[in-house]
Image: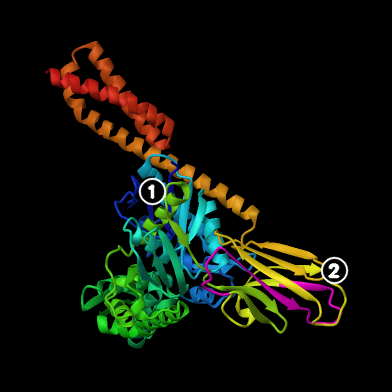
Amino acid sequence: MEKVIGIDLGTTNSCVAIVENGSPVVIPNRGGYKTTPSMVAVTEAGKRIVGHIAKRQAITNAENTVYAAKRLIGRKWNSPQVKNSVATSSYRIVEGPHADVRIVLREKEYSVPEISAMILQEMKVIAEDYLGEPVKKAVVTVPAYFNDNQRQATKDAGEIAGLDVIRIINEPTAAALAYGFGRNLEKTVAVYDFGGGTFDISILEIAQNGVFKVIATAGDTFLGGEDIDARVIDWLVQGFKTEHNVDLRQDRMALQRLKDAAEKAKCELSAVRETEINLPFIISSGRNEALHLQRTLDRKTLEELSADLVERTVEICKQTLEDAKLEKKDVEEVILVGGMTRMPKIQEAVAQFFDREPGKGVHPDEVVALGASIQGAALVDDKQEMILLDVTPHALGIMTFGNFFEELIPANTTVPTHRTKVFTTSRDNQTAVKILVMQGDSEKAEENELLGEFILTGLRRAPKGTVEVEVTFEINADGIVSVRAKDLETSLEQSIQVTATSGLTRDEISSMIQNAQGELLDRRASEEFETHRQEAEKLIAEIERLFPQVEQIVATSDFGRDAIDKARNIVDRAKQAIARKDLDAVKEHVEGLSRTQRMFKGVVART
């Protein structure tokens, strides 16, 4: 059966899993870690690096290291969230050619799907190294509250990374799949997912026959651990400014050091009551003296700094319960997902709201990837009896006269679905109707996301309000939206399949795919060279260690001196091939070095 990997493309960390022998397992990276930082950097030499290596050099290469790119994916340049990131990030964010977002690294502009593709490609490589075979298909998770453009941008990122993303599923839903997999449960559960960049709450019914039905979902795609870090950074910056009258935000390296320290302190305060933040030589003052930052942060202060953010998640939970038409007592288990749920204050807030202690039965960092791999296996295995019924996180509708948003499909409608509504013309003798397809939760059309538009022409001339146009919305299991408009009297019809956009053209995506493949080939060649280089250097070291003994033993014969000369020649040529980074030559010399090493060992052993 074809292998399908499940990828949790996270804001702070990413994770990849696969179902093996009927059980989902997380695949560790080369360092043995189950998660990989969602960070990408370009070094001074122009080399792309991803994950732990990118994180390790983030402070010294702050301007060219990207973190939390997921918060920007699929967003328009003029959105408030993008403005927030522009003001607070240590890397440069600029406007792209399609009013989208681009990130500048070493003077080159990258789209956000391209940056996310680098992380997805890393997940693909981790899986291929583990499985020993190429991987083509993946299920990738997204926050439940992502809109269609954000989902499409994530899908584009998968394509650029060389993956066929066979399904995009919601993170809380994936967590519920992993939680209920193979347990034959009958339960109503709430998944509280507070990650690095986003917050989601989903309420699901899990049935014994393997049906996972989402009743309601809600969230905030710009609320997460990053915001709590930002509060700690503000607290540090403010304190430093009061003490030294110096604004640390003006220095990119200082800002990256602060971010690092804030995240570390936040994590430590889940286990201890207070922690010291000590950043020596953080910046030089105008008089060229080095200034140091040293402050103690306690858990109480952290909780005060982030109280309104935690309260915001509780408000969203409250609204979601109302949307689901359920009471707290109807929820039988609360599943905590995402790294932020390790924070004691968050666990306390959840317990207080739901009137029950949240369950600790799943790994908050791994459960989403495990669920994605379960969904992946189910999609390619006919024998899998698992049905997943998800909902639309946002309402879908059209813009009507007066700039209002007319909802046709409400939020939390189970998909697939279709809805029809009849509208009338708003002007006398109106012969055409422009249908603007929108997604969102505001009554004002301009506050929602425009997904697509089309025009129904050829309407008969008549007084306003007398021509009836029937509009039908349809969403299939993959979340693809189709909209049809029909003049009820003449049966004249026009339709559109709404293709969400990531802000990239097909040509741009094709070019990015080629670049990504080129990068991967270079990387694979570089890794192969590294493997053979290490092997060759090990053999050279062993031969050079044995040289004096062998020379002493065979120096008296012409044959022996000739063999020594040949050995020296092989070693010299191997060293030159390593210096030239000539992979084929190094591979060739490894054989000669192996023979020489065996011969030397034999000579020494016989004496």
* Residue 589 percent across, percent down from the top left: 36, 27
Query: Gap between marks 1 and 2, in whole Å?
Result: 56 Å
Q: Viewed as shown, does residue 491 lie left or right of 415? A: right
**Image quadrant for the N terminus?**
top left
Nearer to me, 27 or 380: 380
Residue at the spot of label 2? 458
Residue 3 visible in image:
yes
- The mark nearer the N terminus, 1 or 2, is 1
* Residue 354 percent across, percent down from the top left: 33, 79
Q: Which residues are drawn in magenta?
A: 410-435
* Residue 150 percent across, percent down from the top left: 54, 65
Residue at the spot of label 1? 126
Q: Looking at the picture, which amino acid does disc 2 mark?
A: Gly
- SS at badge 2: loop
In this rendering, the label closer to the viewer, 1 or 2: 2
Q: Residue at x 78, y 71 (%)?
A: 488
